[in-house]
Image: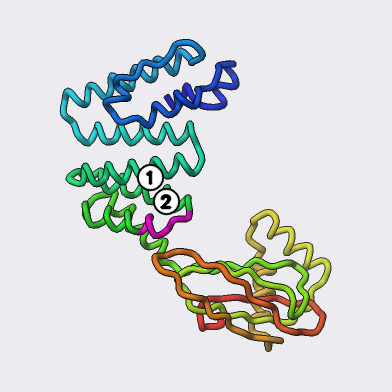
Amino acid sequence: ISFYTDKDHLRNSQIVPLSAETIEMFALPRQKFLAWRPQITGTSPGVLKAVSWYQQLLLFHLRTKNEEALVRASCELLETYLALKGGQKAQLKCAEKLAQMAIKFSNLNYSAVLNYKAANLYLKMARNAEAASLARKGVKSQPNSAGAKLCQQVIDDLSEPLLSVAMDTSLLPGKSKLAITYRNLGFAHFKLVSFPWSNKLDRKVHFYHHRFLSPTDKLRHRLEQSLHRNPVSEWSTPLPSKSDFSEGQLFSVTPEITPGRYILYCTGSNESS
């Protein structure tokens, strides 16, 4: 199904893409999906064949009463639907269905994987509280499974402190704002250091920054050395507590300073290093 509905394959073979109604059929409950007979007109013969194969696969697992294989097949069918549909509504729909499946088949080791997949979808929607809750359920239901390890990784990642600061290259003292995004932190500490920027150094920093590259050791060492200079200004911004691993955002105004070139350091730790 994934192959025959791939956008590149559709484009190269001049096949009409699946209709919205057809895509919704992939999210049907198992029995309704098995009863589905796709329309031949306007649909790729490959898709028709793939759907037929998948229905046969589900029927085979029903006959052999292999619960885990059935759950895996149903899960992959939902992932096919998500790949075809796209968008946040489809993500939410799949996340809810996966969470329901995890509860229904909590006796299976694979239920922890279902919780993990659902948690990941909630993370993509920036709904960290639901993601953490599902990950905890996955760890609790099948603590020794591979899925539980994946769920624990989600919890560990959400428990990590997060701090990022967005700002303009040129700041107006006392007027410009720093956009602070944070998680699991109580304060953001800032240190403003005067630095003898040159046009050559400026170009180097921009070169690495805009290409998402790590600076050379020599450049990194020079920038890190400035951290130990006497600061022109230091201040801390309290960060309102957020529950359930959710991210917060606020703005901090830059202090009054004389015009010049500076490096601004920011950390969520009390240690200057």
Q: How is the image coloured?
A: rainbow
Residue numbers of the magenta segment: 126-132
Which residue is drawn at the image coordinates 22% and 22% (left, top)?
Answer: 60
Residue 11 covered by magenta stretch? no
Q: Position of residue 120 (x, y in %)?
A: 41, 50
Q: Is residue 205 left or right of residue 26?
A: right
**Quadrant including the C terminus:** bottom right
Label 2's element?
helix
Separation of residues labelled 2 and 1 (CA atoms): 7 Å
Return the residue nearer the eye: 87 or 56: 87
Determine the image quadrant of residue 242: bottom left
Which residue is drawn at the image coordinates 50% and 22% (left, top)?
Answer: 18
Q: Position of residue 255 (x, y in %)?
A: 71, 83
Tag of residue 159: none
In the rendered view, tell whether residue 258 sits above or below residue 124.
Answer: below
Tag of residue 122: 2
Asked whether the beta carbons under mark 2 and mark 1 sit within 8 Å of each other, the answer is yes
Which residue is drawn at the image coordinates 29% and 58% (left, top)?
Answer: 136
Determine the image quadrant of residue 95: top left
